[in-house]
Image (cartoon, grey):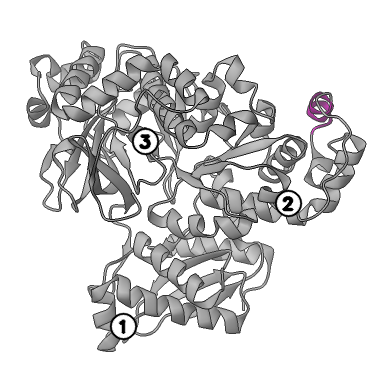
Amino acid sequence: MTGPPTDVPFPLVDVGNGPYRLLRGGRRRAVAALRDGLADPAAAQARRLRVILDGMAGTRFAREHHLDRVSSLAELGQAVPVRTHADLLPWLDAVAAGESSVLTRDPVQMLLETSGTTGRPKHLPVTAGYADTVAEAQGIWMLGLVREHPGLTKGKALTIVSAAEHARSPGGLPIGSNTGRMLARQPWYVRLRYPVPRAVFGLPADQKIYALLRFALPARVTSITTANPSTILLLARRLQQWRQDLSADLSAGTLRHGPAATMDPVLRRRLERRLRRCRPPTGPWTPATLWPLVAVSCWTAGPAAYFASRLEDALGGPVPVHPVGVTASEGYFAVPLSGDWSGGALFVTGHVMEVLDESGEARPAHEAELGERLRLVITTEAGLCRYDLRDVIEVVGRCERTPIVRFVGKAGRYLNAVGERVTEAQLSVAARVAAGATGLRPIGFTARLVLSDIPNYTLAIEGLDPSQAALFTQALDDALMQQNVEYGGKRGSARLGPPAPACMPDGTYLAYRAHRVSQGAPDGQVKDPVMAVDQAEWSELLAAAQQVGALP
């Protein structure tokens, strides 16, 4: 919804283009269940709670919390407190160690590795029930995408994911990424649309992107899908940087130039068997000119908004950007059923969802009202019971009787010196406004609070020279005063000084990304940091900058 929030009817009707009707026929039960659930979300969530509680019956967690006495969400709230990931570690560590029936009766198939900005990676269990729910949500999302963009079925799907498995837990469980797991789960006839072999996604960062481009360049790519818009921006930059090397490999039918020069020779030979010689493209090397792109899909809200706003320039043309909704490794929570929605409908036929207000009071998520910003709490088929996701969502509309929500940012992530409480989402919007006002588009930026007699922010910027950085920083300051009235008031009263730019050397955010991946974060989920809330986060960025060049 690009305009004012309104109530909208269920859009996945039984008429539409041929590919949509075919897909809808295969998912008719899921579509009917979701349509009924959106019309009566309380009943849908009650049914899902019964299924999840049944899957937890007899487990260690259920015995410790007397879940056999629980039959409603209100009773669950009395039996189980809201917990963070850190609070659940005693149970999660037992799962990783190989103990059975800890959180669910269903066997744990694997662990999903994900991480926040810093700290120990999270390892989250996957069960058959969880996998089915996420696959159903993904299928519904794809249905809405095809309904609006039938042309994407006439070509290949460039899907950028992390490795499905890269390690084993102490108890022998596979550890990998959710995106890789979902791709591997696709049926064979869907995987035929992927031009890139799965082995590529397990390569180190630069080798992976280079090999991905080498396989994708000769293909008729009609869609690009990845979680993070900054990954698509990176793809566009690498096309320019590696054009000569990629052209040589295309002409020779090889995978031997650029970062591929250091690839494991056994794997290279296996991949090269799938390659053919072809003429390198002429003209501009931008995604929209190289491929007949119909749509790209990625995060578009919260801190990702600035990077999503840069996609048209990076792609080399106006390609529709379709949001992927409110998703995480923990599950799929809100599905955009239409590309012009500014959020997604709560997936009430999937996980059980609650929301917390500022006082910490919990209530069912489907009772959230228009305009409210609330924290999401989830209960899933993988055994995460009243798990504080720390995602802040905002209700922007309603589909039937169910809220449409958008992701705002992580709870507790803000800069605050004198009461201004600037959030990542506000910084992202201010940067987008500043880019429009100045015509300057930095590769990356990060705000940090500097405490002194008159505190201010330092704005680390890559991709602009000092004069450009000063101009962009001033424009961002102006936009932020409009975004946040408290920030504007503090700036106007001189209790908060003007932000100061700090130019970072070229490659800083690439080095930051590589470091985060080396610490265990799936590369597709690494977000360029819009803010550094503490010295550790700032030091991590500075270390990346020092790795690639001298700081000014």
Q: CA distance from mark 1 to mark 2?
A: 42 Å
Q: Which residue is mark 1?
A: 496
Q: Type of residue at label 3?
A: Leu
Q: Which residue is mark 3?
A: 337
Tell me: residue 32, above or below residue 253: above
Q: Type of residue at label 1?
A: Leu
Is residue 456 toward the left or the right of residue 264 in the image? left
Binning the other alpha carbons within 10 Å of mark 1 as few (below 14), some (14 to 19) or many (20 upward) gives: many
Image coords of residue 201 (percent x, y): 64, 33
Q: Earlier in the sequence, mark 1 or mark 3?
A: 3
Q: Type of residue at label 2?
A: Leu
Image coords of residue 71 (percent x, y): 9, 18
Tell me: residue 196, above or below residue 532: above
Main SS, magenta residues: helix
Q: Secondary structure at mark 3?
A: loop
Q: Secondary structure at mark 1?
A: loop
Q: Earlier in the sequence, mark 1 or mark 2?
A: 2
Q: CA distance from mark 2 to mark 3?
A: 32 Å
Q: Earlier in the sequence, mark 2 or mark 3?
A: 2
Q: Which mark is residue 239?
A: 2
Would you identify the image quadrant in which residue 57 lies? top left
Image coords of residue 324 (percent x, y): 43, 40
- Which quadrant: the C terminus? bottom right
The part of the chain drawn in magenta is: 264-272
**Extreme right residue here?**
252
Q: Residue at x 30, y 26 (%)?
A: 91
User: Does the residue at mark 1 contact the one at mark 2 (Cβ under 8 Å)?
Assistant: no
